Image (cartoon, helix red, strand yellow):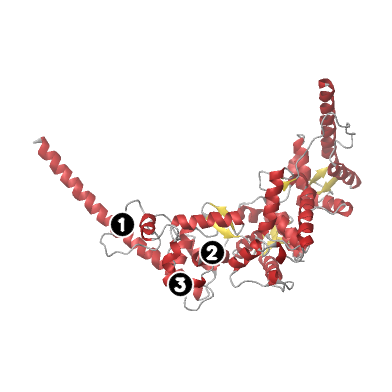
Amino acid sequence: MQQTNSLQELALCVERHNETVRQARALWSEAEQASQKIGRLVGLAVSMGTSWAELGRVLARLDEMPAPTGLKAPGPESAPSPLHTDKAHEEHHLPAAEPATAREASRVPQQGTADGSPGQRPEQKPPTQSRALQIVRGVCWPSGIGVDTLRRTLAAEGHTVTEPQTRSWFDQWIRSGDVQQIGADRYLGSTVGRTPLLLQRAHQVVALTPDKEMSTRELAAALNENVQIVGGELCSMLREVGITRPNRGKIRARYGGTTGPRLPGYKAETLARAIALYDARATSPQPSGPAATPAADPVQADAERAQAPPAQAPAAHTSQTACERALHIVREAGATGITHVALVRQLDDEKHTVVAPQVRAWLREWVRQGVVNQLQDGAHAMPHHPEPPSAAAPTEDDSVPRVLVRAREATHEAGGKISSQELFTALQRETPVYRDASDVAGQLVALLNRVGVKRPDRGKVRVRLGQPQVLGFTATTLEQGINAYRKAAADRLSAAAKRH
């Protein structure tokens, strides 16, 4: 009797399982059809001129998830979804040495031919990968693009790619500097030599606000960046193309709502003007020569510039001069260092003919040789080599960083308190090696932290009576830092004397 009940219960469980599986297959089939329709609609909207910003706001609500393991639509007549092609099935029908783009040779015309003959297929990158990079570079909304969204867009254009294949492309683009990862499974095209990525993201965020303006602190929070980095870098990017923020960088919003001084921030109109100038500079005529002729495909153009032999460069000494200048810029950056993007931008401003992969190769070689150190934040700086005990004992002035001494002198001249902007102006007159006030303040704060000196009131000072507090330094704090460096040097000398 008990055995009969168990068999009946088993039969009921099997029936419920089969019914649930059939429902799941039907639901997943509907999801696949909707997914393919989304891809087709995205491609149609792009072809009709819809902006990526509008598409991004709609696609941001899209839930992306892979197909459940083992779940397939029933029936041999059901074609595999272009969004979730089974990798084992694909490898079974394709030669091992041929990439997954072999199928599209019969339906996607190759570049440079009218009939799509495979004999003239470019060797640098498959056309699907080239088109995928174009799509990623065309994304301009701040949230970027995900792997599944890219695959849907490619599927709408007739390309069939797998998820592992797409992720391998992103890994390759990140290593080459073509793409930057801005979040979990979110990517944006890099804009080295074009409009800076931070400037593009800032404009997209500010342009979506009702007043078309945003304070620096709110903008930094929206971009998930440090407020000092956003303020300093954006100001530097605007000055690079000759843009000055109106009203001394102040917007209509005020501290404390309606009673305090106006907040520093950015207007969408100002950021848009800067982007237009960057675009105009990127498309301006280049010097004549083989390297100045752009390729039809931007991906192939980047590859040709990066792989061009030295004979195609304007002159052999030009690259050497640029390499020496790049090392000098890293040396001038001090303890805070300089990022790869900022180094390429500065070399480009100084009219040096370099490309991003070339500069990246220099930095890797310098790191390997020990000439340059790579910091935790990705920046590069010159290593600190302390003198051995047998060397000549440093004088008291040599033990204190020069910028700290000059900052104290400038602060004393200003009456004992000085803002970061005024300090930058004073130091820049003597040695113009700093990018902006944030650069100077960052180096000084790093030097003070190294000897355990903290600025009171979170670094805010009241330079003049009746005016609000601003970020800056006091002569007392800088004097404490100098004394700490002198004491550390004396302790090192005392310890060395005891050892000998």
Quadrant where the C terminus lies?
A: top right
Residue 424 to residue 205: above or below: above
Three-letter code, disc 1: Lys
Q: Mark on residue 108?
A: 3
Q: Are marks 2 and 3 in contact (CB under 8 Å)?
A: no
Task: Give the residue at mark 1.
Answer: 72
Residue 122 location, quadrant = bottom right
Q: Secondary structure at mark 1?
A: loop
Name the quarter where the N terminus is drawn.
top left
Instruction: State the residue at coordinates (44%, 67%).
Output: 159
> Mark 3 Cα within 10 Å, few/some/many (few <14, many 20+)?
some
**Residue annotated with mark 2:** 125
The Cα atoms of the two marked residues, 2 and 3, are separated by 14 Å
Q: Label 2 is placed on what type of residue?
A: Lys
Quarter of the image holding residue 35? bottom left
- Visible in this render: residue 330? yes
Name which of mark 1 and mark 2 comes first in the sequence: 1
Label 3 and label 1: CA atoms lie apart by: 28 Å
Element under label 3? loop
User: Where is residue 432 shown, x and y percent of the image?
Assistant: 85, 54
For the residue pair 178 and 294, the one nearer the viewer reads as 294
Would residue 100 be found to the left or right of residue 210 on screen? Answer: left
